[in-house]
Amino acid sequence: AVVLVDAAGQPIARAGRWGDEVPLDPGLVADAEAARDGHARRVAAGRLVAAYAPVGGLGWSLIVEEPAQDAFAAARALRSETLAGTAAAALIALLVGLGFARRLTGALERLTEAARAVGAGRLDARVALKSDDEVGVLARTFNQMGAELAAGRAEIERWNQELEARVAERPRA
């Protein structure tokens, strides 16, 4: 409601939904009579939010009152929307994080399996991983290492066969 009061604090005019049925807060009217500019504050046991301002040089004041529930409805809606948006963003971030973690874990498990196979002597074990990130570089390096180990083993086996053939050709004394 909007109420225009005179220098004595008596209502001159009212507009808004309440009309004459809601009395003005005496403390608010006293501050308005003293011609102080008033910031919004809660009155009527917190049910209302009110503010006042002097009107020209007449000694009158304009008092505006609004139910606290209505005055803060937009702020409450904004808070709810912000909380819902934040919760949605957190959920999306969690799902993306879980997706990345699952992808990384799967790649590392394949690398671990291949490393165990090479450790067991199967030098032909390779990791089929096509990515350009650090894990992909590691997989390509592992595959290159396996190929070099297999080539080295093949060369050693060839040298062994050559050596065995030389020993077999040598006359026995």
Image (cartoon, helix red, strand yellow):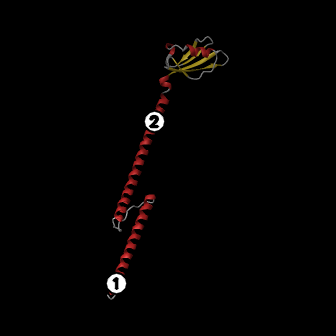
Q: Going 39% across and 57% down the picture, which residue do you hit? A: 108
Q: Nearer the viewer, mark 1 or mark 2?
A: 1
Question: To which residue does mark 2 refer?
Answer: 83
Give me the C-alpha separation between circle 1 and circle 2: 83 Å
Q: Quadrant of the C terminus?
A: bottom left
Q: Is residue 117 left or right of residue 76?
A: left
Eyeballing the image, is 23 above or below 103?
above
State the image coordinates of residue 100 (x, y, percent, origin top left). Answer: 41, 51
Q: Tell me if I can see residue 133 in this picture.
A: no
Q: Residues within 10 Å of mark 1 (few under 14, many from 20)?
A: few
Q: Quadrant of residue 41?
A: top right
The amino acid type of the residue labelled 1 equals Val
Kindly identify the amino acid type of the residue bearing the numbered disc 2. Leu
Say the numbered circle drawn on residue 70: none
Q: Residue 123 falls in which quadrant of the image?
A: bottom left
Q: Is residue 105 above or below residue 86?
A: below
Regarding residue 61, the answer to whether it shows in the image is yes
* Number of marks in the rendered image: 2
> Please, what secondary structure does the residue beneath circle 1 have?
helix
**Residue where numbered disc 1 is placed:** 167
Is tag 1's residue or tag 2's residue first in the polypeptide sequence?
A: 2
Q: Position of residue 63 (x, y in %)?
A: 57, 18
Q: Is residue 56 left or right of residue 94?
A: right
Give 104 or 90, whichever is nearer the viewer: 104
Callout 2 secondary element:
helix
Q: Position of residue 118 (x, y in %)?
A: 36, 65
Q: Is residue 14 left or right of residue 141?
A: right
